[in-house]
Amino acid sequence: MQNRKSVWGWVLYDWANSAFATTVMAGFFPIFFKQYWSAGTDINMSTAQLGFGNSLASLGVAFMAPVLGAIADKGYAKKRFLIFFAYLGVGMTAALFWVQQGAWLWAILVYSLGVVGFSGANVFYDSLLPTVAGEESIDRVSSLGFSMGYLGGGLLFLLNVLMTLHPGFFGLPDAGLAVRVSFVSVALWWGLFTLFTIFWVPESREKRIKGTRTAIAEGYRQLLRTFKKIKHMKVIFLFLLAYWFYMDGVSTIIRMAVDYGLSLGFQTNDLILALLIVQFVGFPAALIFGKLGQVWGVRRAIFLAIGAYIGITLWGTTMQTTHEFYRLAVMIGLVQGGIQALSRSYYARLIPWNQSAEYYGFYNMLGKFAAILGPALMGGVGLLVRRMLFPDTPTAEQLLQIGQLATRWSLGSIVLLFFIGGVLLYFVDEAKGREQIPALADDGEG
Protein backbone atom coordinates (compact mmCIF):
# COMPACT_ATOMS: atom_id res chain seq x y z
CA MET A 1 0.00 0.00 0.00
CA GLN A 2 1.34 3.40 -1.01
CA ASN A 3 2.54 5.98 1.53
CA ARG A 4 -0.15 8.66 1.86
CA LYS A 5 2.37 11.48 2.35
CA SER A 6 4.27 10.58 -0.82
CA VAL A 7 1.00 10.35 -2.78
CA TRP A 8 0.03 13.86 -1.69
CA GLY A 9 3.53 15.12 -2.40
CA TRP A 10 3.17 13.78 -5.94
CA VAL A 11 -0.39 15.08 -6.35
CA LEU A 12 0.58 18.58 -5.20
CA TYR A 13 2.87 19.01 -8.19
CA ASP A 14 -0.23 18.79 -10.39
CA TRP A 15 -1.79 21.40 -8.09
CA ALA A 16 1.35 23.53 -8.54
CA ASN A 17 2.00 23.42 -12.28
CA SER A 18 -1.65 23.48 -13.38
CA ALA A 19 -1.60 27.20 -12.59
CA PHE A 20 0.68 27.60 -15.63
CA ALA A 21 -1.54 25.42 -17.81
CA THR A 22 -4.66 27.35 -16.80
CA THR A 23 -3.74 31.00 -16.24
CA VAL A 24 -0.91 31.17 -18.79
CA MET A 25 -1.32 28.56 -21.54
CA ALA A 26 -5.10 28.38 -21.78
CA GLY A 27 -6.11 31.74 -20.32
CA PHE A 28 -4.23 35.00 -20.24
CA PHE A 29 -1.34 34.38 -22.63
CA PRO A 30 -3.51 33.85 -25.76
CA ILE A 31 -5.66 36.87 -24.83
CA PHE A 32 -2.73 39.12 -23.94
CA PHE A 33 -0.81 37.94 -26.99
CA LYS A 34 -3.64 38.91 -29.34
CA GLN A 35 -4.57 42.17 -27.65
CA TYR A 36 -1.24 43.45 -26.27
CA TRP A 37 1.86 41.77 -27.67
CA SER A 38 0.41 41.29 -31.18
CA ALA A 39 -2.00 44.24 -31.21
CA GLY A 40 -3.12 45.34 -34.67
CA THR A 41 -2.16 42.09 -36.39
CA ASP A 42 -4.65 40.27 -38.62
CA ILE A 43 -6.61 37.63 -36.59
CA ASN A 44 -5.52 34.68 -38.73
CA MET A 45 -1.90 35.82 -38.68
CA SER A 46 -1.86 36.17 -34.87
CA THR A 47 -3.48 32.72 -34.58
CA ALA A 48 -0.75 31.32 -36.82
CA GLN A 49 1.96 33.08 -34.76
CA LEU A 50 0.57 31.60 -31.55
CA GLY A 51 0.12 28.16 -33.10
CA PHE A 52 3.62 28.04 -34.55
CA GLY A 53 5.05 29.35 -31.25
CA ASN A 54 3.36 26.53 -29.35
CA SER A 55 4.64 24.07 -31.92
CA LEU A 56 8.22 25.34 -31.64
CA ALA A 57 8.21 24.93 -27.86
CA SER A 58 6.75 21.44 -28.12
CA LEU A 59 9.36 20.46 -30.71
CA GLY A 60 12.17 21.29 -28.30
CA VAL A 61 10.67 19.20 -25.52
CA ALA A 62 9.85 16.34 -27.87
CA PHE A 63 13.48 15.88 -28.87
CA MET A 64 14.76 16.16 -25.29
CA ALA A 65 12.21 14.04 -23.43
CA PRO A 66 13.28 10.44 -24.17
CA VAL A 67 16.99 11.22 -23.79
CA LEU A 68 16.43 12.96 -20.46
CA GLY A 69 14.22 10.12 -19.30
CA ALA A 70 16.89 7.55 -20.10
CA ILE A 71 19.54 9.61 -18.31
CA ALA A 72 17.31 10.02 -15.27
CA ASP A 73 16.64 6.29 -15.04
CA LYS A 74 20.33 5.37 -15.33
CA GLY A 75 21.37 8.05 -12.83
CA TYR A 76 18.27 7.83 -10.61
CA ALA A 77 17.88 11.58 -10.96
CA LYS A 78 14.18 12.01 -11.72
CA LYS A 79 13.65 14.59 -9.00
CA ARG A 80 16.78 16.51 -9.94
CA PHE A 81 15.57 16.91 -13.52
CA LEU A 82 12.04 17.73 -12.36
CA ILE A 83 13.42 20.53 -10.18
CA PHE A 84 15.53 21.96 -13.01
CA PHE A 85 12.71 22.08 -15.55
CA ALA A 86 10.06 23.17 -13.06
CA TYR A 87 12.07 26.19 -11.96
CA LEU A 88 13.01 27.01 -15.56
CA GLY A 89 9.27 27.26 -16.16
CA VAL A 90 8.82 29.30 -12.99
CA GLY A 91 11.50 31.77 -14.05
CA MET A 92 10.18 32.21 -17.59
CA THR A 93 6.61 32.68 -16.33
CA ALA A 94 7.75 35.48 -14.05
CA ALA A 95 9.75 36.99 -16.92
CA LEU A 96 6.55 37.52 -18.96
CA PHE A 97 5.87 40.46 -16.62
CA TRP A 98 8.66 42.45 -18.29
CA VAL A 99 7.82 41.77 -21.97
CA GLN A 100 6.71 45.10 -23.46
CA GLN A 101 3.67 45.86 -25.62
CA GLY A 102 4.11 44.95 -29.28
CA ALA A 103 7.08 42.64 -28.57
CA TRP A 104 5.29 39.55 -29.86
CA LEU A 105 8.52 37.75 -30.79
CA TRP A 106 9.95 38.16 -27.28
CA ALA A 107 6.61 37.05 -25.84
CA ILE A 108 6.70 33.86 -27.93
CA LEU A 109 10.34 33.18 -26.99
CA VAL A 110 9.85 33.60 -23.23
CA TYR A 111 6.56 31.69 -23.32
CA SER A 112 8.16 28.88 -25.34
CA LEU A 113 10.91 28.47 -22.73
CA GLY A 114 8.20 28.37 -20.06
CA VAL A 115 6.47 25.59 -21.97
CA VAL A 116 9.79 23.74 -22.21
CA GLY A 117 10.10 23.93 -18.42
CA PHE A 118 6.48 22.89 -17.88
CA SER A 119 6.61 19.98 -20.33
CA GLY A 120 10.13 18.83 -19.43
CA ALA A 121 9.24 18.61 -15.74
CA ASN A 122 6.15 16.56 -16.60
CA VAL A 123 8.36 13.81 -18.06
CA PHE A 124 9.86 13.21 -14.62
CA TYR A 125 6.68 13.93 -12.70
CA ASP A 126 4.83 11.24 -14.69
CA SER A 127 7.72 8.80 -14.22
CA LEU A 128 7.40 9.11 -10.42
CA LEU A 129 3.81 7.80 -10.53
CA PRO A 130 4.84 4.12 -10.17
CA THR A 131 7.02 5.14 -7.21
CA VAL A 132 4.07 6.42 -5.18
CA ALA A 133 1.21 4.18 -6.42
CA GLY A 134 0.82 0.43 -6.67
CA GLU A 135 -0.83 -1.21 -9.68
CA GLU A 136 -4.16 -1.52 -7.87
CA SER A 137 -4.33 2.23 -7.17
CA ILE A 138 -2.51 3.77 -10.12
CA ASP A 139 -5.69 4.85 -11.97
CA ARG A 140 -7.07 6.46 -8.81
CA VAL A 141 -3.82 8.28 -7.94
CA SER A 142 -3.33 9.49 -11.52
CA SER A 143 -6.90 10.79 -11.62
CA LEU A 144 -6.47 12.42 -8.21
CA GLY A 145 -3.46 14.31 -9.57
CA PHE A 146 -5.40 15.72 -12.50
CA SER A 147 -8.39 16.44 -10.28
CA MET A 148 -6.33 18.44 -7.80
CA GLY A 149 -4.65 20.16 -10.74
CA TYR A 150 -8.02 21.38 -11.97
CA LEU A 151 -8.94 22.59 -8.49
CA GLY A 152 -5.62 24.31 -7.75
CA GLY A 153 -5.30 25.83 -11.20
CA GLY A 154 -8.92 26.91 -11.10
CA LEU A 155 -8.63 28.62 -7.71
CA LEU A 156 -5.59 30.68 -8.71
CA PHE A 157 -7.15 31.45 -12.08
CA LEU A 158 -10.29 32.67 -10.31
CA LEU A 159 -8.13 35.01 -8.20
CA ASN A 160 -6.33 36.21 -11.33
CA VAL A 161 -9.63 36.84 -13.11
CA LEU A 162 -10.87 38.92 -10.15
CA MET A 163 -7.62 40.89 -10.29
CA THR A 164 -8.22 41.78 -13.95
CA LEU A 165 -11.92 42.59 -13.49
CA HIS A 166 -11.39 44.68 -10.34
CA PRO A 167 -7.73 45.82 -10.42
CA GLY A 168 -8.37 48.75 -8.08
CA PHE A 169 -9.44 46.40 -5.29
CA PHE A 170 -5.96 44.83 -5.47
CA GLY A 171 -4.16 48.18 -5.62
CA LEU A 172 -3.50 47.93 -9.39
CA PRO A 173 -4.13 50.79 -11.84
CA ASP A 174 -5.52 48.78 -14.77
CA ALA A 175 -6.34 45.32 -16.13
CA GLY A 176 -3.17 45.19 -18.26
CA LEU A 177 -0.91 45.38 -15.22
CA ALA A 178 -3.20 42.92 -13.43
CA VAL A 179 -2.57 40.33 -16.17
CA ARG A 180 1.18 40.86 -15.91
CA VAL A 181 1.03 40.51 -12.12
CA SER A 182 -0.98 37.31 -12.64
CA PHE A 183 2.01 35.82 -14.47
CA VAL A 184 4.13 36.51 -11.37
CA SER A 185 1.48 34.95 -9.11
CA VAL A 186 1.60 31.77 -11.21
CA ALA A 187 5.39 31.63 -10.85
CA LEU A 188 5.13 31.96 -7.06
CA TRP A 189 2.34 29.37 -6.81
CA TRP A 190 4.19 26.88 -9.02
CA GLY A 191 7.51 27.37 -7.25
CA LEU A 192 6.17 27.15 -3.69
CA PHE A 193 3.94 24.09 -4.07
CA THR A 194 6.68 22.22 -5.96
CA LEU A 195 8.57 22.15 -2.65
CA PHE A 196 6.09 19.57 -1.31
CA THR A 197 6.98 17.26 -4.19
CA ILE A 198 10.69 17.78 -3.60
CA PHE A 199 10.52 16.92 0.10
CA TRP A 200 7.68 14.37 0.26
CA VAL A 201 8.16 12.16 -2.82
CA PRO A 202 10.86 9.50 -2.39
CA GLU A 203 13.21 8.30 -5.08
CA SER A 204 15.11 5.04 -5.09
CA ARG A 205 18.88 5.44 -4.66
CA GLU A 206 19.79 1.86 -5.53
CA LYS A 207 22.49 1.36 -8.16
CA ARG A 208 22.89 5.09 -8.59
CA ILE A 209 25.51 5.89 -11.21
CA LYS A 210 28.04 8.37 -9.90
CA GLY A 211 29.10 11.16 -12.21
CA THR A 212 27.07 13.19 -14.71
CA ARG A 213 29.09 12.06 -17.74
CA THR A 214 28.61 8.40 -16.86
CA ALA A 215 24.86 8.91 -16.38
CA ILE A 216 24.58 10.69 -19.74
CA ALA A 217 26.56 8.03 -21.59
CA GLU A 218 24.58 5.20 -19.99
CA GLY A 219 21.36 7.10 -20.65
CA TYR A 220 22.08 7.36 -24.38
CA ARG A 221 22.96 3.67 -24.59
CA GLN A 222 19.80 2.68 -22.76
CA LEU A 223 17.73 4.97 -25.00
CA LEU A 224 18.99 3.22 -28.12
CA ARG A 225 18.26 -0.21 -26.61
CA THR A 226 14.76 0.84 -25.59
CA PHE A 227 14.00 2.36 -28.99
CA LYS A 228 15.00 -0.90 -30.68
CA LYS A 229 12.70 -2.80 -28.34
CA ILE A 230 9.74 -0.47 -28.85
CA LYS A 231 10.02 -0.89 -32.62
CA HIS A 232 9.38 -4.60 -32.14
CA MET A 233 6.77 -4.29 -29.36
CA LYS A 234 3.59 -3.78 -31.32
CA VAL A 235 1.38 -3.03 -28.31
CA ILE A 236 3.47 -0.18 -26.90
CA PHE A 237 4.17 1.19 -30.36
CA LEU A 238 0.47 1.21 -31.29
CA PHE A 239 -0.57 2.81 -28.03
CA LEU A 240 2.05 5.55 -28.34
CA LEU A 241 0.94 6.21 -31.92
CA ALA A 242 -2.72 6.35 -30.88
CA TYR A 243 -1.86 8.63 -27.97
CA TRP A 244 0.12 10.85 -30.32
CA PHE A 245 -2.95 11.52 -32.46
CA TYR A 246 -5.80 11.81 -29.97
CA MET A 247 -3.80 13.78 -27.40
CA ASP A 248 -2.83 16.13 -30.19
CA GLY A 249 -6.47 17.09 -30.46
CA VAL A 250 -6.80 17.52 -26.69
CA SER A 251 -3.65 19.66 -26.42
CA THR A 252 -4.65 21.81 -29.38
CA ILE A 253 -8.07 22.56 -27.91
CA ILE A 254 -6.47 23.44 -24.57
CA ARG A 255 -3.96 25.82 -26.14
CA MET A 256 -6.04 27.35 -28.92
CA ALA A 257 -9.63 27.51 -27.57
CA VAL A 258 -9.37 31.07 -26.27
CA ASP A 259 -7.71 32.28 -29.47
CA TYR A 260 -10.50 30.55 -31.42
CA GLY A 261 -13.18 32.34 -29.40
CA LEU A 262 -11.48 35.70 -29.85
CA SER A 263 -11.28 35.14 -33.61
CA LEU A 264 -15.05 34.51 -33.68
CA GLY A 265 -15.66 37.80 -31.88
CA PHE A 266 -16.52 36.54 -28.39
CA GLN A 267 -15.78 38.84 -25.46
CA THR A 268 -12.74 38.23 -23.28
CA ASN A 269 -14.83 37.92 -20.09
CA ASP A 270 -17.02 35.25 -21.70
CA LEU A 271 -13.95 33.21 -22.66
CA ILE A 272 -12.46 33.50 -19.18
CA LEU A 273 -15.73 32.35 -17.62
CA ALA A 274 -15.71 29.33 -19.95
CA LEU A 275 -12.19 28.44 -18.80
CA LEU A 276 -13.29 28.65 -15.17
CA ILE A 277 -16.17 26.31 -16.00
CA VAL A 278 -13.71 23.78 -17.46
CA GLN A 279 -11.57 23.92 -14.32
CA PHE A 280 -14.30 23.45 -11.76
CA VAL A 281 -16.20 20.83 -13.78
CA GLY A 282 -12.90 19.05 -14.41
CA PHE A 283 -12.18 18.71 -10.67
CA PRO A 284 -14.89 16.13 -9.86
CA ALA A 285 -15.01 14.75 -13.42
CA ALA A 286 -11.39 13.57 -13.31
CA LEU A 287 -12.11 11.64 -10.11
CA ILE A 288 -15.25 10.13 -11.65
CA PHE A 289 -13.31 9.07 -14.74
CA GLY A 290 -10.74 7.38 -12.53
CA LYS A 291 -13.53 5.35 -10.92
CA LEU A 292 -15.07 4.68 -14.33
CA GLY A 293 -11.75 3.30 -15.53
CA GLN A 294 -11.68 0.85 -12.60
CA VAL A 295 -15.29 -0.30 -13.03
CA TRP A 296 -15.86 -0.11 -16.78
CA GLY A 297 -12.31 -0.51 -18.05
CA VAL A 298 -9.65 2.10 -18.79
CA ARG A 299 -9.66 1.51 -22.55
CA ARG A 300 -13.43 1.90 -22.84
CA ALA A 301 -13.33 5.09 -20.80
CA ILE A 302 -10.66 6.53 -23.13
CA PHE A 303 -12.84 5.64 -26.15
CA LEU A 304 -15.76 7.46 -24.52
CA ALA A 305 -13.62 10.58 -24.10
CA ILE A 306 -12.38 10.44 -27.71
CA GLY A 307 -15.96 10.18 -28.98
CA ALA A 308 -16.96 13.13 -26.82
CA TYR A 309 -14.10 15.22 -28.19
CA ILE A 310 -15.15 14.50 -31.78
CA GLY A 311 -18.63 15.75 -30.95
CA ILE A 312 -17.23 18.79 -29.13
CA THR A 313 -15.01 19.73 -32.08
CA LEU A 314 -17.78 19.38 -34.67
CA TRP A 315 -20.15 21.43 -32.53
CA GLY A 316 -17.45 24.05 -32.09
CA THR A 317 -17.22 24.61 -35.86
CA THR A 318 -20.89 25.70 -35.97
CA MET A 319 -21.00 27.55 -32.64
CA GLN A 320 -22.65 30.98 -32.77
CA THR A 321 -23.44 32.13 -29.21
CA THR A 322 -21.64 32.44 -25.90
CA HIS A 323 -24.17 30.07 -24.33
CA GLU A 324 -23.00 27.37 -26.74
CA PHE A 325 -19.43 28.14 -25.73
CA TYR A 326 -20.36 27.64 -22.06
CA ARG A 327 -22.04 24.30 -22.81
CA LEU A 328 -18.98 23.18 -24.75
CA ALA A 329 -16.85 24.19 -21.76
CA VAL A 330 -18.93 21.90 -19.52
CA MET A 331 -18.46 19.01 -21.96
CA ILE A 332 -14.71 19.60 -22.18
CA GLY A 333 -14.45 19.73 -18.40
CA LEU A 334 -16.21 16.37 -18.15
CA VAL A 335 -13.67 14.53 -20.32
CA GLN A 336 -10.41 16.50 -20.43
CA GLY A 337 -8.91 15.36 -17.12
CA GLY A 338 -10.22 11.84 -17.58
CA ILE A 339 -8.55 11.19 -20.92
CA GLN A 340 -5.26 12.60 -19.64
CA ALA A 341 -5.27 10.69 -16.35
CA LEU A 342 -6.35 7.33 -17.77
CA SER A 343 -3.92 7.54 -20.70
CA ARG A 344 -1.07 8.07 -18.22
CA SER A 345 -2.09 5.16 -15.99
CA TYR A 346 -2.94 2.86 -18.93
CA TYR A 347 0.56 3.33 -20.32
CA ALA A 348 2.03 2.39 -16.93
CA ARG A 349 0.45 -1.07 -17.39
CA LEU A 350 2.45 -1.64 -20.57
CA ILE A 351 5.98 -0.68 -19.43
CA PRO A 352 8.62 -1.93 -16.98
CA TRP A 353 8.43 0.21 -13.87
CA ASN A 354 12.19 0.14 -13.28
CA GLN A 355 12.62 2.17 -16.49
CA SER A 356 9.61 4.44 -16.05
CA ALA A 357 11.32 7.79 -16.72
CA GLU A 358 12.75 6.52 -19.98
CA TYR A 359 9.46 5.07 -21.21
CA TYR A 360 7.55 8.15 -20.06
CA GLY A 361 10.13 10.12 -22.00
CA PHE A 362 8.84 8.47 -25.17
CA TYR A 363 5.28 8.99 -23.96
CA ASN A 364 5.79 12.70 -23.39
CA MET A 365 7.84 13.03 -26.56
CA LEU A 366 4.92 11.83 -28.67
CA GLY A 367 2.53 13.99 -26.69
CA LYS A 368 4.66 17.04 -27.50
CA PHE A 369 5.14 16.05 -31.13
CA ALA A 370 1.34 15.84 -31.28
CA ALA A 371 1.12 19.36 -29.88
CA ILE A 372 3.39 20.42 -32.73
CA LEU A 373 1.00 19.05 -35.34
CA GLY A 374 -2.28 20.36 -33.91
CA PRO A 375 -1.63 24.10 -33.48
CA ALA A 376 0.35 24.19 -36.72
CA LEU A 377 -2.52 22.38 -38.48
CA MET A 378 -5.00 24.96 -37.20
CA GLY A 379 -2.78 27.85 -38.21
CA GLY A 380 -1.97 26.39 -41.62
CA VAL A 381 -5.54 25.37 -42.51
CA GLY A 382 -6.85 28.77 -41.44
CA LEU A 383 -4.35 30.62 -43.63
CA LEU A 384 -4.96 28.24 -46.58
CA VAL A 385 -8.75 28.61 -46.47
CA ARG A 386 -8.42 32.37 -46.12
CA ARG A 387 -6.19 32.55 -49.19
CA MET A 388 -8.57 30.36 -51.22
CA LEU A 389 -11.61 32.52 -50.37
CA PHE A 390 -9.93 35.94 -50.43
CA PRO A 391 -11.45 38.19 -53.15
CA ASP A 392 -9.37 40.75 -55.01
CA THR A 393 -10.93 43.79 -53.34
CA PRO A 394 -12.59 42.62 -50.11
CA THR A 395 -14.77 44.89 -48.02
CA ALA A 396 -14.29 45.11 -44.25
CA GLU A 397 -17.33 42.89 -43.75
CA GLN A 398 -16.00 40.30 -46.19
CA LEU A 399 -12.63 40.31 -44.40
CA LEU A 400 -14.35 39.52 -41.10
CA GLN A 401 -16.56 36.79 -42.59
CA ILE A 402 -13.67 35.14 -44.43
CA GLY A 403 -11.48 35.26 -41.32
CA GLN A 404 -14.15 33.62 -39.15
CA LEU A 405 -14.93 30.95 -41.76
CA ALA A 406 -11.22 30.11 -42.04
CA THR A 407 -11.04 29.86 -38.25
CA ARG A 408 -13.97 27.41 -38.16
CA TRP A 409 -12.34 25.23 -40.83
CA SER A 410 -9.09 25.26 -38.87
CA LEU A 411 -10.86 23.83 -35.81
CA GLY A 412 -12.68 21.23 -37.90
CA SER A 413 -9.37 19.82 -39.09
CA ILE A 414 -8.68 18.57 -35.54
CA VAL A 415 -11.44 15.91 -35.84
CA LEU A 416 -9.12 13.90 -38.08
CA LEU A 417 -6.62 13.54 -35.24
CA PHE A 418 -9.20 12.17 -32.79
CA PHE A 419 -10.50 9.73 -35.41
CA ILE A 420 -7.06 8.33 -36.26
CA GLY A 421 -6.16 8.04 -32.57
CA GLY A 422 -9.35 6.12 -31.81
CA VAL A 423 -8.81 3.67 -34.67
CA LEU A 424 -5.24 2.94 -33.58
CA LEU A 425 -6.27 2.50 -29.94
CA TYR A 426 -8.80 -0.14 -31.04
CA PHE A 427 -5.92 -2.40 -32.09
CA VAL A 428 -4.01 -2.11 -28.78
CA ASP A 429 -4.02 -5.46 -26.93
CA GLU A 430 -3.35 -4.79 -23.23
CA ALA A 431 -3.08 -8.49 -22.30
CA LYS A 432 -0.38 -9.03 -24.90
CA GLY A 433 1.36 -5.88 -23.71
CA ARG A 434 1.58 -7.23 -20.17
CA GLU A 435 3.16 -10.41 -21.51
CA GLN A 436 5.88 -8.37 -23.19
CA ILE A 437 6.93 -6.51 -20.02
CA PRO A 438 9.46 -9.12 -18.76
CA ALA A 439 11.32 -8.86 -22.07
CA LEU A 440 11.58 -5.10 -21.60
CA ALA A 441 12.35 -5.06 -17.89
CA ASP A 442 16.07 -5.75 -18.00
CA ASP A 443 18.49 -3.82 -15.82
CA GLY A 444 19.86 -1.82 -18.72
CA GLU A 445 23.18 -3.60 -18.72
CA GLY A 446 22.57 -5.77 -21.81
Image (cartoon, rainbow, N blue to C red):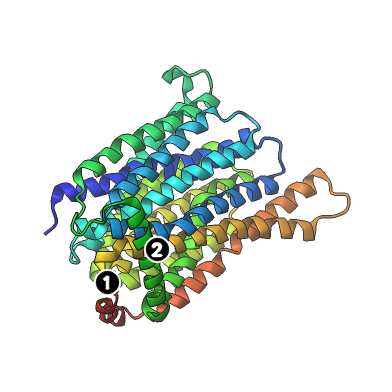
Residue 34 place in picture, x, y as percent: 62, 39
> What residue sits 48% from the left and 48% below the top?
326
What amino acid is labelled 2 in the image? Tyr
In the rendered image, is residue 413 in sight?
A: yes
| Secondary structure of residue under mark 2 | helix
What amino acid is labelled 1 in the image? Trp
Instruction: Check the image and report above or below for 260 versus 106.
Output: below
Residue situated furthest left in the rendering: 1
Label 1 – label 2 distance at C-alpha = 39 Å
> What residue sits 29% from the left and 63% below the top?
356
In the displayed structure image, the side of residue 271 where residue 361 appears, left or right? left
In the displayed structure image, the side of residue 95 where residue 382 appears, left or right? right
Please name whichever residue, 412 or 398, is drawn nearer the observer in this view of the structure: 412
Residue carrying label 1: 296
| Quarter where residue 64 is shown | bottom left
Q: Quadrant of the C terminus?
A: bottom left
Of pointers 1 and 2, the one earlier in the residue sequence: 2
> What residue sits 57% from the left and 36% below the top?
32
In the rendered image, is residue 159 in sight?
A: no
> What residue sits 61% from the left and 57% below the top?
376
Residue 286 place in picture, x, y as percent: 31, 56
Residue carrying label 2: 220
Instruction: Look at the numbered discs 1 and 2 and tell me whether their residues touch, using CB distance below 8 Å.
Output: no
Task: Bin the neighbour count of mark 1 within 10 Å (Cα to Cα): few under 14, some 14-19, many 20 and up.
Answer: few
| Quarter where residue 204 is shown | bottom left
Please name whichever residue, 193 or 218, is drawn nearer the observer in this view of the structure: 218
Q: Quadrant of the N terminus?
A: bottom left
Residue 57 place in picture, x, y as percent: 53, 50
Query: In this rendering, which labeled residue sits more in front, label 1 or label 2?
Result: 2
